[in-house]
Image (spheres, rainbow, N blue to C red):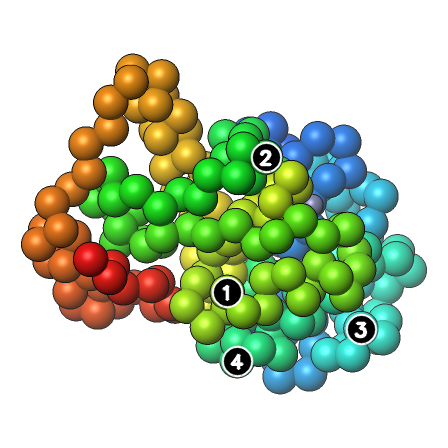
Amino acid sequence: MNPDEAKAMILDIGQRMYSKEWVASNDGNISVKLDADRVLVTPTRQSKGYMTAGMLSIVDRQGHVLEGTYQPTSELKMHLKIYEMRPDVNAVVHAHPPFATSFAVAGIPLDRYILAEAVFELGKVPIAPYATPSTDELTDSFVDLLSEHDCFLLKNHGATTMGIDLMTAYYKMESLEHLAKIMNYASSLGKMDEIPQDKVRVLEGMRQKYGIHGRQPKSTV
Ligand SMILES: [Zn+2]
């Protein structure tokens, strides 16, 4: 991806995340692969709502800074592990959206088939066990989920989404937070009807037709 275009898009996504209150203070991080060897990443300890292009860094796949004066995100290991395990992924978004994070705190995965679009885009969204942010423990916590999922919650922490490009990764976070919000509201009504299983399979069958990239677990019932 062209570095200037990638920088502009990351700044835009950072502003959207901040204005949606998916991140407080300096939380959250975003990255995109520029090519096979270089990754553009957001800085640590800077608000994602007020970033400038000069705050972004280019690192190699081992995390060495190739370009930039700001220290890359403390969650760089998470991003690099995802790129290592999933060659089909070109962008990663990590945030703490309040509804999704509430489910991560409660230990309730987003695993009910209640919205057609969510079945289509996300499938079930699991929770990785709690791990200290920025450590190898954190990358170990989600690595088993990557074979089947493009989106997961991090226990007592937040959510991570990935995709073939930046907007796909960002939109998955938007879909995930929307699903969590509706699950929360439906729970407060005391009743949550799921889409019938045979209709879930119809939705799963439509993913390929509509060019939905990435991995979503198939329903098993
Ligand atoms: Zn975080």
Residue at the image position 11 percent from the left and 45 percent from the top: 196
Task: Choose between 6 and 189: the one closer to the eye.
Answer: 189
* Label 1 – label 2 distance at C-alpha: 18 Å
Could you tell me residue 108's position as x and y percent? 46, 39
Q: Which quarter of the rendered image does ligand 1 occupy? A: top right
Mark 1 residue type? Leu
> Between disc 1 and disc 4, whose residue precedes?
4
- Left/right of residue 17 with respect to residue 69 in the rendered view: left
> Between disc 4 and disc 2, whose residue precedes?
4
Residue at label 1? Answer: 145
Q: Does 205 appear above or below 106?
A: below
* Label 4 – label 2 distance at C-alpha: 30 Å
Task: Choose between 203 and 47: the one closer to the eye.
Answer: 203
Residue at label 4? Answer: 87
Which element carries disc 4, helix, strand or loop?
loop
**Quadrant holding the C terminus:** bottom left
Residue at label 2? Answer: 105
Which element carries disc 3, helix, strand or loop?
loop
> Between disc 3 and disc 2, whose residue precedes?
3
Task: Choose between 92 and 195: the one closer to the eye.
Answer: 195
Q: Residue furthest bottom?
A: 36
Q: Which numbered disc covers residue 63?
A: 3
- Left/right of residue 210 with respect to residue 69 in the rendered view: left
Mark 4 residue type? Pro
Residue at the image position 52 percent from the left and 50 percent from the top: 127
